[in-house]
Amino acid sequence: GNLERVLIQGDLSGLTEEERTGFYRNVCKSLGLNPLTLPLAFLKLSGRLILYAKKDCTEQLRKIHGVSIVALETSSQDGLFIATAKAHDKHGRSDSDMGFAAVGGLKGENLGNAMLKAVTKAKRRATLSICGLGMLDETEVEDITVKDKAVIEPSGLSLPETPEVDAEVQQKLYESAVKALNDAFTGSPCSEQAQAVLTELE
């Protein structure tokens, strides 16, 4: 069908507004996210439409999956300030990811803000990574300076709050959603660009 085709291509622009709303709702439900808080948003980038994670997404994922940032390392190299966050979750898994900021020539408050942003980015990327979500975070979207970038908030989400579900059911939903989302976002130019730069919540 139409949905399967656009997911295989990793581009949601072929969905109707109704299909897009349904897809958004199902992703939130699968991950245990409350859709009314709009934890995800659509990003139109170079003609492609993808989902990315907003701040509220990573905050909810941390609570749901007991994600803790257990270590943070920083370094500087070639005008970049690099932060690496290590995360653990309640299932005993661990993962880490990086965030960086260009700090060449920055001083005082501007330097401090850039360093804080790199730390925030590392924490959020580590949270998404340990939850198996290969999508961009809001801090990364802010850094993309492409002429035809457009953030599109989801509409038509007159939905009840996400109901409480049994932990075992929740875990199965979560694992199936992780697989679906990984499949959907594998091969995304954004993912490849981020992986190349970084070599692989606030």
Image (cartoon, rainbow, N blue to C red):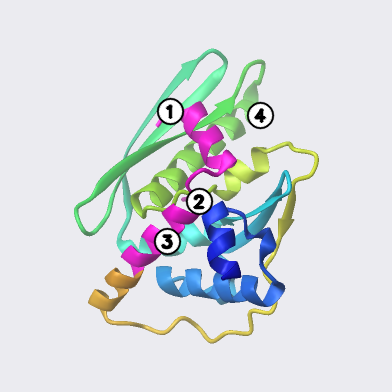
Of label 1 and label 4, which has the lower sequence position? 4
**On the rendered structure, is 65 left or right of 185?**
left
Residue where numbered disc 4 is placed: 110
In this view of the protein, which residue sits in the foreground, 41 or 72? Answer: 41
Front label number (3 vs 4) = 3
What distance separates the C-alpha of mark 4 from that of mark 2? 34 Å
Q: Which mark is residue 111?
A: none
Q: Main secondary structure of the magenta part?
A: helix
Circle 2 sits in a helix, a strand or a loop, which is it? helix
Of label 4 and label 2, which has the lower sequence position? 4
Front label number (1 vs 4) = 1
What distance separates the C-alpha of mark 1 from that of mark 4? 27 Å
Q: Residue at x 43, y 28 (%)?
A: 199
Of label 3 and label 2, which has the lower sequence position? 3
Front label number (3 vs 1) = 3
Q: Is residue 187 magenta?
A: yes
Displayed quadrant of residue 21: bottom right
What distance separates the C-alpha of mark 3 from that of mark 2? 9 Å
**Residue type at numbered disc 1:** Thr
Residue range of the region highlighted in magenta in the rendering: 174-202
Residue where numbered disc 3 is placed: 180
Q: Residue at x 60, y 31 (%)?
A: 114
Res 32 seen here = no
Residue where numbered disc 2 is placed: 185
In this view of the protein, which residue sits in the foreground, 173 or 78? Answer: 173
What distance separates the C-alpha of mark 1 from that of mark 2? 17 Å
Of label 3 and label 4, which has the lower sequence position? 4
Q: Which mark is residue 199?
A: 1
